[in-house]
């Protein structure tokens, strides 16, 4: 599916998500980087050894799920917007998902927006928890959203500006 549509399928995603046991231990990075291109800023941005050393600049990044603490520092380093952080234990029924966001208008804290799947299709309304920029020179915002636990592997982005009233 990935090669023909550009959209990762279940098998691709199973290869980059940690085990359910690791998810329950705290925030962790998920790196959906599937193309072998010469790129490694995610690795150099990580202060904790959470991204395993590359043998070659074209290696795909792999996460050491025991070292990654979900600090979010790698998110905005990635030019492909391929990294998100999941905090599975955020609430009983909701995870906290932090994604890179580079569109305007920006979402507002507390706003209900459209949650999109990896094909860009709307599948659920989600609430924005926070929006920050880690570095003022950076153009990438980090948007945290609350995602229902039963959809946390489906939702990957948001659409703002056509928001829900709730
Ligand atoms: S979230 Fe933090 S610890 Fe984990 S891979 Fe990214 S930079 Fe490293
Ligand atoms: S910075 Fe992004 S695109 Fe580059 S290797 Fe890392 S995850 Fe892949």
Image (tube, helix red, strand yellow):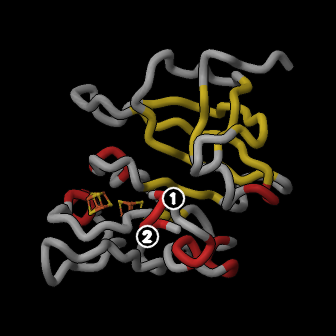
Q: Quadrant of the C terminus?
A: top right
Q: Which residue was labeled with disc 2?
A: 68
Residue at disc 2, secondary structure: loop
Viewer-side residue, 10 vs 4:
4
Dot 1: few (<14), some (14–19), or many (≥20) neighbours within 10 Å? some
Mark 2 beta carbon near ligand 1 (under 8 Å): yes
Viewer-side residue, 38 vs 63:
38
> Residue at image x 76%, y 56%?
151
Does residue 88 appear left or right of residue 134 in this picture? right
Residue that sits furthest to the front in the current view = 4
Residue at disc 1, secondary structure: loop
150 lies above or below 111: below
53 lies above or below 102: below
Rounded to the nearest angstrom, the CA distance separating label 1 from label 2 is: 25 Å
> Residue at image x 69%, y 78%?
20
Q: Which residue was labeled with disc 1?
A: 7
Dot 2: few (<14), some (14–19), or many (≥20) neighbours within 10 Å? many
């Amino acid at each position: 599916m990935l090669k023909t549509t550009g959209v990762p399928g279940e098998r691709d995603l199973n290869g980059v998500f940690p085990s359910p046991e690791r998810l329950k231990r705290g925030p962790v990075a998920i790196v959906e980087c599937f193309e072998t291109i010469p790129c490694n800023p995610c690795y150099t941005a990580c202060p904790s050894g959470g991204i395993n050393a590359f043998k070659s600049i074209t290696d795909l990044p792999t996460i050491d799920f025991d070292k990654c603490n979900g600090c979010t520092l790698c998110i905005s380093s990635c030019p492909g917007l391929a990294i998100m952080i999941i905090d599975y234990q955020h609430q009983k029924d909701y995870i906290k998902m932090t994604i890179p966001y580079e569109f305007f208008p920006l979402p507002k804290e507390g706003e209900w927006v459209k949650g999109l799947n990896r094909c860009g299709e709307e599948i659920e309304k989600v609430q924005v928890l926070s929006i920050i920029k880690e570095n003022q020179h950076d153009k990438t915002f980090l948007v945290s959203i609350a995602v229902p636990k039963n959809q946390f592997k489906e939702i990957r982005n948001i659409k703002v500006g056509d928001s829900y009233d709730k």
